Image (cartoon, coloured by chain):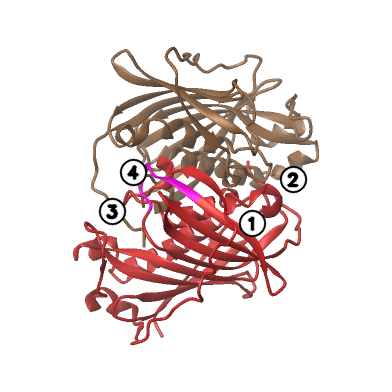
Chain colours: A brown, B red
Amino acid sequence: MGLRYSAPYTVPYYDCDVNGNMTFPSLLSVVIKWSGDQSALLNRDNAFVAQFGLTWVITNYEIDITKMPRVEQTVMITTEAMSYNKFFCYRNFWIHDEVGNQLMEIRATFVLMDRVNRKMGHVIEEIIAPYQSEKIKKILRAPLIEAINEEEKVSYRVRFSDIDSNQHVNNAKYYDWILDVLGFDFLTTYVATYVNMRFIKEVEYGAVVESVFERSQKDGEILTKHRIDVDGVPHAEANILWRPMVKESREKREI
Amino acid sequence: MGLRYSAPYTVPYYDCDVNGNMTFPSLLSVVIKWSGDQSALLNRDNAFVAQFGLTWVITNYEIDITKMPRVEQTVMITTEAMSYNKFFCYRNFWIHDEVGNQLMEIRATFVLMDRVNRKMGHVIEEIIAPYQSEKIKKILRAPLIEAINEEEKVSYRVRFSDIDSNQHVNNAKYYDWILDVLGFDFLTTYVATYVNMRFIKEVEYGAVVESVFERSQKDGEILTKHRIDVDGVPHAEANILWRPMVKESREKREI
């Protein structure tokens, strides 16, 4: 329903993990740049939104993955503001390979947050009209995220490099904590097919986060459950489904 | 003396810190991609080098900074293989702004390392001839790095996201540990003018590194001294000079 924006992206080596697959932090940072570029084209950049005392914040990602983008691959990234209601804006991203096969679909939920008190505000027509997305009554909800039964956890101190220009940890960075706990062997044996993540509270500089997790099964697939706690308070939660990785030859070009 | 390779780069928001300045990890990752792109053009990519059982490794960075690249700025990145001797290859990078002012110069020392035993090998003519760099007898040395007198330190566990496709921590990532210990207040008050860094040993996945540091003065300037230890063994050391930051208006475009 909304306007679409597409542009190609060639995946540099530093966006990729040991497997040669694009990492989630890089992936989400890059697609969010695409929505920023669309916003700039529509004269709705961050400075425009800031006039209302607001800033965009992401509350949910739901991701279907057929294949992760690979190092040096040129993919097409497309985004579209799909619909919105009184509080939530729904934006999709798609990544396609060179011949048009879909590699992934990302469904993101955005809210407009007060820049000072960090409370959620109403969606403002003047901000979102140019995207031509559909106004809906319904609140769309991603599937429920399954809670953790048997907890394991690892602590991480928020690094200076984890925070972005708004002094909060960028949503994309949460994936470093969430994935790291699964360990090298797991992360070089399995690849994600589905991610459902909910951001509950913003994590601030100086915090020590606990990345809580559990490995389990669901309908024969490997399911990992995750929660990010600060001082025992949940700040984010996620479920990820995995499949065994098919190893590909790697064209390494670090230099 | 050598062939030059230049291409523009527009700095995305996710390359930048809270100040809107490009971070060192991003900066070094990106310039190394430029040398990789030049190598590919000269048919000397990593796969070519791997035929000899070798891989490029960086042992030193010396960086003169007039101004850090800014978020959304389009800079020109230029690289040139300057000269080489029996063991070392010297490559420079320059970053210029839109009107040709030099923002920084990076002088890097590369060695060819055996992919299996991780020992330094001789420079091989067949690998480096196409760069047309000058053969020299002399071993060029960066200024001595001043040792730390009064130690402070913070520990960091190497994250899965810190390692690259060769399963070692990418040199660019060391700057996260080195800078993080200086703290938010320091890093939003001062900006680096000079970096001299030496990589001694490779850091591996699973290691806990200690980022050891000291703040001091040199000729009226602020000097920070750094060392990265693993199990008490120095793996890298650095000196950084700083000046007070001139705050700039920020055009934020995270979305």
Q: Which mark is residue B21?
A: 1
Q: Which residue is mark 4?
A: A99
Distance between mark 2 and mark 3 Cα atoms: 40 Å
- In the structure shown, which secondary structural element does the residue marked by tag 3 occupy? loop
Q: Which residue is mark 3?
A: A251
Distance between mark 4 and mark 2 Cα atoms: 37 Å
- In the structure shown, which secondary structural element does the residue marked by tag 2 occupy? helix
Across and down, in percent, residue B120 comes to: 27, 67
Residue A182 appears in the figure: yes
Q: Earlier in the sequence, mark 2 or mark 3?
A: 2
Are the residues flagged by discs 4 and 2 in contact, CB closer than 8 Å?
A: no
Tell me where the magenta segment starts and ends, as one range.
B203-210
Distance between mark 1 and mark 4 Cα atoms: 37 Å
Q: Earlier in the sequence, mark 4 or mark 2?
A: 2
Badge 3 crowding class, 10 Å Cα cut-off, few under 14, some 14 to 19, many 20 or more, is some
Across and down, in percent, residue A201 comes to: 64, 26
Q: Quadrant of residue B234?
A: bottom left
Badge 4 crowding class, 10 Å Cα cut-off, few under 14, some 14 to 19, many 20 or more, is few
Which three-letter amino acid code belongs to the residue tagged 2?
Ala
Q: Nearer the viewer, residue A48 or A101?
A: A48
Are the residues flagged by discs 3 and 4 in contact, CB closer than 8 Å?
A: no
Say which of marks 2 and 3 sits in front.
3
Chain letter of disc 3?
A
Say which of marks 4 and 2 sits in front.
2
Are the residues flagged by discs 2 and 3 in contact, CB closer than 8 Å?
A: no
Which three-letter amino acid code belongs to the residue tagged 4?
Val
Residue B95 appears in the figure: no
Say which of marks 1 and 4 sits in front.
1
Q: Which residue is mark 2?
A: A47
Across and down, in percent, residue A28 comes to: 51, 38
Which three-letter amino acid code belongs to the residue tagged 3?
Glu
x 32%, y 81%: residue? B85
